[in-house]
């Protein structure tokens, strides 16, 4: 149990285009999902917290107009990188907290590697 | 505030033990441990919530000190599959409850 999927796993796009990344909890419902960004050989940096039915909360320094987050249901959150530029190239990982557990465990998706040319 | 992990890297032979430490400058709500292999997502190992807590998962165990500022991950009789980067994620609680701040990672390499 507690499987989180992400789609796509890899995406290459041209500068100026927008890219949507989906994060799904496959066998549990998640009121809260998180989006992280990871640069090569670096740690995970929390970008935003996504709550079902409400606006996402962004960490300091993260542009909310550039990284659009939508948490449409208890099993789906999407991250859209708008007008992507080469500096947005990174590994984007989502995580989800299960509603049915009484712990705060976050389960991570397999990640999406974005390359902006 | 980012927790400090030590050491930055560890090289072991199969069967050897390792300890990875995670320190915070202030008391935490919880500590989460993950292992990440290259190009993959972090895999959850365990979570510690209580001061003085110790818990285990097969040959991997962890402790959380009484002040809830330090946690250690213990890897005993290491196997090749233990290789990867280990991260601690800390939850400071309060207004930041539920959000994890990750340490810089500890690269563990196990050789035959």
Image: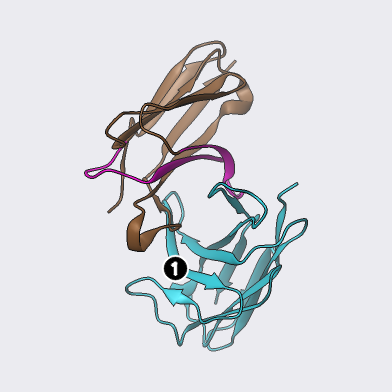
**Which color has been applied to chain B in this rendered view?**
brown
| Residue B14 image point, x, y percent | 57, 14
Instruction: State whether residue B109 is above or below residue A19.
Output: above
Tell me the chain of label 1.
A
> Which of B12/B50 is in front?
B50
Residue ID at (58%, 87%): A17
| Residue A56 image point, x, y percent | 50, 77
- Does any portion of residue B37 appear in the rendered image? no
Instruction: State whether residue B6 is above or below residue A40.
Output: above
Other-residue count near label 1 (Cα within 10 Å), few / some / many at <14 / 14–19 / ≥20: many
- Residue B45 highlighted magenta (yes or no): yes
Instruction: State whether residue A60 is above or below residue B48.
Output: below
Instruction: Read off the magenta span.
Output: B23-48
Which quadrant, please, contains the C terminus of chain A? bottom right
Element carrying mark 1 = strand
Give the total of numbered labels: 1
Coloration of the structure image: by chain
**Which color has been applied to chain A in this rendered view?**
cyan
Residue beneath disc 1? A47
Residue B61 relative to residue B89: left or right: right
| Residue B49 image point, x, y percent | 44, 39
- Residue A59 highlighted magenta (yes or no): no
| Residue A70 image point, x, y percent | 60, 80
Residue ID at (53%, 64%): A34
- Does any portion of residue B65 appear in the rendered image? yes
Residue B107 relative to residue A12: left or right: left
């Amino acid at each position: 149990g507690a499987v989180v999927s992400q789609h796509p796993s890899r995406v290459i796009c041209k500068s100026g285009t927008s890219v949507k990344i989906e994060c799904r909890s496959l066998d549990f419902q998640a009121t809260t999902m998180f989006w992280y960004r990871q640069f090569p050989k670096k740690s995970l940096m929390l970008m935003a917290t996504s709550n079902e039915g409400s606006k996402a909360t962004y960490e300091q320094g993260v542009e909310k107009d550039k990284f659009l987050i939508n948490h449409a249901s208890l099993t789906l959150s999407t991250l859209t990188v708008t007008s992507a530029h080469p500096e947005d190239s990174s590994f984007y990982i989502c995580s989800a907290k299960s509603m049915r557990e009484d712990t705060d465990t976050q389960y991570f998706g397999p990640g999406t590697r974005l390359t902006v040319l | 505030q980012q927790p400090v992990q030590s050491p930055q890297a560890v090289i072991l032979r199969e069967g050897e033990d390792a300890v990875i430490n995670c320190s915070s400058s202030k008391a935490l709500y919880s500590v989460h441990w993950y292992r990440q292999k290259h190009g993959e997502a972090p895999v959850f190992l365990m979570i510690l919530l209580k001061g003085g807590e110790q818990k285990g998962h097969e040959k991997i165990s962890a402790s959380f000190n009484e002040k809830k500022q330090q946690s250690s991950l213990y890897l005993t009789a290491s196997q090749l599959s233990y290789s990867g980067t280990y991260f601690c994620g800390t939850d400071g609680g309060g207004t930041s409850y539920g959000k994890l701040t990750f340490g810089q990672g500890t690269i563990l390499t196990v050789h035959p």
